């Protein structure tokens, strides 16, 4: 869409987010603008991101931002996609850990992400409305998390196991949001409850979902 | 706000939603407009409600609508509040039924509501964004459902039981949405999975949440 522009990285730029009138290569400029957008959605609802603040911090004109992102919606989508990538990276646990530890480690990381940047999380998980781009980011992110979990449980997860896992992720999200409001119990109690729910429900969902006449469960 | 106007119901009106230039009493007019809004959000995202269609169907001017509802946001909030009341009424189960039957009946009704009017449900449960009025409607609705369920389990529900129940309601919602996309399993399997989750998780959450040195559990 941007034509045959150079794809080389900006050389010698220390990726300064402060005002700078440096010329940046397109990739570096896009990355810089997305990073500035990420900073904004950490502290305010994503639909209140101020394009003026982003362009001022980058030391560029609004026109240049709209050269890289055709509309504010497109810019926000790029920012939210970056936030989703952060969430997925933050909740990726060491595959060498025992399975029980992985569940708890993933839960802790997921809750910590929501806690530390609730507005970024809301942008990913609840901000889509009827916006196609944002719905796609939400769906991709949630599916990735669900696939990670179900892959631990079954090489060929049934639809019911997938539904239960997806439901459990929503349970984690909702309970964490509610907990953040006034922390009515300790963090460890919250984690224990959510872990207990996974350990009780998901293995049962796996057997519920198995077709009674299936002769193989491995994919 | 509307001053000392009559509160009598519109006499003789058969609550026609079609074009009518009848004078209606303020309460009846508000109810009519909300009903027309409800019809719209059953079939389209609530943020795409067309005020023009509502006023045309009511046979009134836009100015008159904005006399009753100061802004489109206020009108939408009234419509979504009415949808939430419908949801609560639809999922209210017979208190004379055995407890196990009530859970299943409530689940069936909840899933049926989402299935029959997904866009109304989305408006209640996911449309709030950062809108204070809509957040309040969502919170009131969800709290009412959570209180109904926890009251069945404990006269004095602990914070952990409340969090678990709230999480379970989110699980129902998310699994149902995903199920509606392509119905990867039968309705009964979906209901069985969600019922199983409630029966396994909520009683355990009740004991998790109990303070170890509490000497009374009834409120």
Image (cartoon, coloured by chain):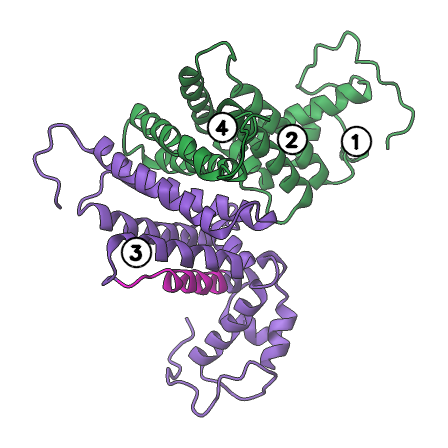
Chain colours: A green, B purple
Q: Is residue A92 above or below residue B24?
A: above
Element class at badge 1: helix
Q: Chain of mark 3?
A: B
User: Mark 3 — residue?
Assistant: B101
Residue A13 position in % (x across, y down): 75, 10
Instruction: Check disc 2: other Cα within 10 Å, few if <14, some if 14-19, many if 20+.
Output: many
Q: Is residue A185 left or right of residue A213?
A: left
Mark 3 and mark 1: span between their CA atoms?
Answer: 57 Å
Instruction: Residue lying at the far top in this picture: please name it.
Output: A12
User: Mark 1 — residue?
Assistant: A68
Numbered mark located on residue B111 in the image: none
Labels 3 and 1 share a subunit: no
Prevalent SS, magenta region: helix
Element class at badge 3: helix
Does the magenta segment cover residue B87?
A: yes
Does the magenta segment cover residue A7?
A: no
Residue B198 position in % (x across, y down): 34, 43
> Does label 2 or label 4 sit earlier along the sequence?
2
User: Mark 2 — residue?
Assistant: A81
Mark 4 and mark 1: span between their CA atoms?
Answer: 26 Å
Residue at image location 44% in from the left, 46% down from the top: B172
- The part of the chain drawn in magenta is B77-94
Element class at badge 4: loop
Instruction: Check disc 4: other Cα within 10 Å, few if <14, some if 14-19, many if 20+.
Output: some
As rendered, which of A41 and B48 lies closer to the eye? B48
Element class at badge 2: helix
Residue at image location 26% in from the left, 47% down from the top: B150
Mark 3 and mark 4: span between their CA atoms?
Answer: 41 Å
Residue A92 position in % (x across, y down): 53, 19
Q: Chain of mark 1?
A: A
User: Mark 4 — residue?
Assistant: A117
């Amino acid at each position: 869409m941007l034509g045959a522009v150079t794809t080389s990285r900006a050389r010698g730029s220390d990726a300064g987010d402060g005002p700078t009138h440096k010329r940046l290569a397109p990739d570096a400029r896009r990355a810089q603008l997305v990073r500035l957008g990420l900073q904004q959605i950490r502290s305010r609802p994503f639909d209140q991101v101020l394009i003026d603040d982003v362009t001022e911090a980058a030391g560029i004109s609004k026109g240049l931002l709209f050269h890289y992102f055709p509309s504010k919606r497109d810019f926000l989508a790029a920012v939210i996609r970056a936030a989703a990538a952060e969430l997925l990276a933050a909740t990726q646990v060491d595959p060498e850990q025992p399975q029980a530890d992985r569940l708890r480690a993933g839960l802790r990381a997921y809750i910590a992400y929501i806690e530390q940047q609730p507005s970024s999380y809301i942008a990913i998980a609840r901000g889509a409305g009827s916006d196609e781009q944002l719905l796609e980011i939400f769906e991709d992110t949630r599916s990735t998390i669900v696939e990670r979990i179900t892959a631990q449980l079954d090489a060929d997860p049934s639809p019911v196991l997938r539904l239960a896992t997806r439901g459990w992720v929503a349970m984690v999200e909702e309970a964490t949001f509610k907990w953040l409001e006034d922390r009515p119990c300790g963090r460890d109690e919250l984690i224990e409850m959510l872990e207990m729910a996974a350990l009780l429900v998901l293995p049962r969902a796996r057997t519920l979902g198995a077709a009674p006449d299936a002769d193989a469960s491995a994919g």
